[in-house]
Image (tube, rainbow, N blue to C red):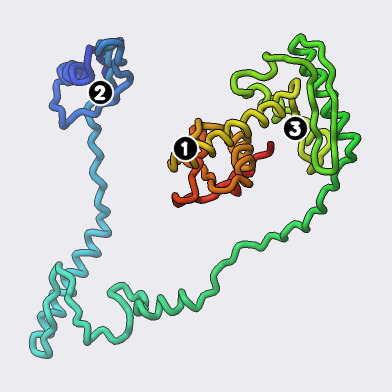
């Protein structure tokens, strides 16, 4: 049967039109949706539904071979004779379409109705347990890599000086960079007062210090610590924090109360802990969470925990 094709706003309407053309019922037709309408903006539909349909083809009946019919007739005749002759002997149970129910006690050969061997569940689990498990191939562990040696101090100093000189030039600042170092630390100071390099609460200076450390570590790896200062700001900040901490300690001793300081970064908190470490009658502890973590100055009559050990930031 040839296909007919119809279009409508919806798929159902297109199918109805196809049924009208074919003149058959829905159950006698075969459909193929070629295209469906698309959903547009604000719930509107775009395009039309296109459906192909035809009458379902009927499968031709298979021709019955005459030889097969004669063979089946001969078997049915022989079966009827054998059943008639067995009436005088032992009677056999009449077969029905239902499968015979086999009792568990009679199933001693360990096989099912189709002759396939059936193993008990316990035997299967035992066999699975005894079967060696597949192991993933072991990977050879890489040999311990030798630890890289520190670069010479001169190479690290050169890298720090070149980076800071280029950085100040990028900022449009003409300033010298001086270096002071020992076996554990390099202190690089950008001379002059440059507020642009400090930033609010020295955040820009901290960022410059971190960039300098990362750049030097890539070019000349070393375990030496690198500090960056601008115009002696860090030293002045350390002195001011020490003075502020001693004033807070005097207030805690005079009034016998805990004094809570403003939130500080880890470096400033360590300065406060170190400044009051040798002051008799008070102790310090840190509280809160970063970036709002702060120092509490506690008089000895209060239960105070010295938290100077938890401030591991470099100063």
Q: Where is residue 269 in the image (x, y as percent from the top left)?
A: 58, 37
Q: In this view, does 25 lie to the left or right of 218?
A: left
Q: In this view, does 87 lie to the left or right of 178?
A: left
| C-beta proximity under 8 Å, tags 1 and 2 | no
Residue under label 2, please give it.
53
- Of the residues tagged 3 and 2, which is closer to the observer? 3
Residue at point 57% right, 67% down? Answer: 134
Answer above or below: position of 308 versus 11: below
In the displayed structure, does residue 64 sit left or right of residue 219?
left
Q: In which quarter of the image is the C terminus?
A: top right
Residue 145 vs residue 258, the one in the foreground:
258
The answer to whether the residues at label 3 and label 2 have Cβ atoms under 8 Å apart is no
The answer to which of marks 3 and 1 sits earlier in the sequence is 3
Residue with the mark numbered 1: 259
Who comes first in sequence, dot 3 or dot 2?
A: 2
Residue reaching furthest front?
Answer: 254
**Residue 281, position as x, y percentages in the image:** 54, 48
Decide: is 282 above or below 76.
Answer: above
Instruction: Judge whether residue 304 can be spotted in this image.
Output: yes
Q: Mark 3 points at which residue?
A: 227
Location of residue 186 with respect to 38 vertically, above or below? below
For the residue pair 71 and 257, the one nearer the viewer reads as 257
Q: Few, some or many C-alpha atoms within 10 Å of disc 2 (few <14, some 14-19, many ≥20)?
A: many
The picture quadrant where one finds residue 14 is top left
- Secondary structure state at the residue bearing disc 1: strand
Task: Give the mark nearest the N terminus, 1 or 2.
Answer: 2
Q: How far apart are marks 1 and 2 (CA)?
A: 88 Å
Q: Marks 3 and 1, how far apart in space?
A: 31 Å
């Amino acid at each position: 049967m040839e296909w007919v094709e119809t279009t409508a706003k919806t798929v159902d309407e297109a199918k109805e039109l196809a049924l009208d053309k074919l003149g058959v019922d829905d159950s006698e037709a075969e459909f193929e949706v070629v295209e469906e309408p698309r959903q547009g903006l604000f719930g509107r539909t775009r395009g039309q539904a296109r459906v192909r349909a035809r009458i379902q083809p009927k499968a031709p009946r298979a021709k019955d071979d005459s030889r097969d019919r004669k063979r089946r007739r001969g078997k049915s005749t022989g079966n009827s004779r054998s059943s008639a002759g067995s009436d005088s002997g032992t009677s056999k149970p009449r077969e029905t379409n239902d499968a015979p129910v086999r009792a568990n006690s009679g199933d001693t050969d360990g096989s099912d109705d189709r002759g396939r061997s059936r193993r008990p569940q316990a035997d299967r689990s035992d066999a699975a347990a005894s079967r060696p498990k597949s192991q993933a191939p072991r990977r050879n562990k890489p040999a311990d890599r030798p630890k890289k040696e520190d670069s010479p101090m001169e190479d690290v100093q050169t890298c720090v000086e070149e980076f800071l000189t280029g950085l100040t030039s990028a900022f449009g600042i003409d300033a010298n960079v001086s270096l002071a170092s020992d076996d554990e630390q390099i202190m690089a100071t950008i001379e002059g007062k440059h507020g642009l390099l400090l930033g609010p609460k020295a955040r820009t200076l901290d960022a410059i210090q971190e960039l300098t450390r990362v750049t030097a570590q890539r070019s000349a790896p070393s375990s030496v610590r690198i500090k960056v200062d601008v115009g002696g700001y860090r030293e002045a900040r350390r002195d001011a924090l020490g003075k502020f901490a001693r004033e807070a300690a005097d207030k805690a001793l005079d009034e016998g109360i805990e004094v809570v300081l403003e939130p500080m970064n880890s470096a400033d908190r360590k300065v406060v802990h170190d400044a009051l470490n040798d002051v008799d009658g008070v102790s310090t502890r840190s509280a809160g969470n970063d970036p709002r973590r702060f120092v509490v100055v506690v008089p000895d009559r209060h239960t105070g925990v010295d938290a100077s050990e938890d401030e591991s930031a470099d100063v």
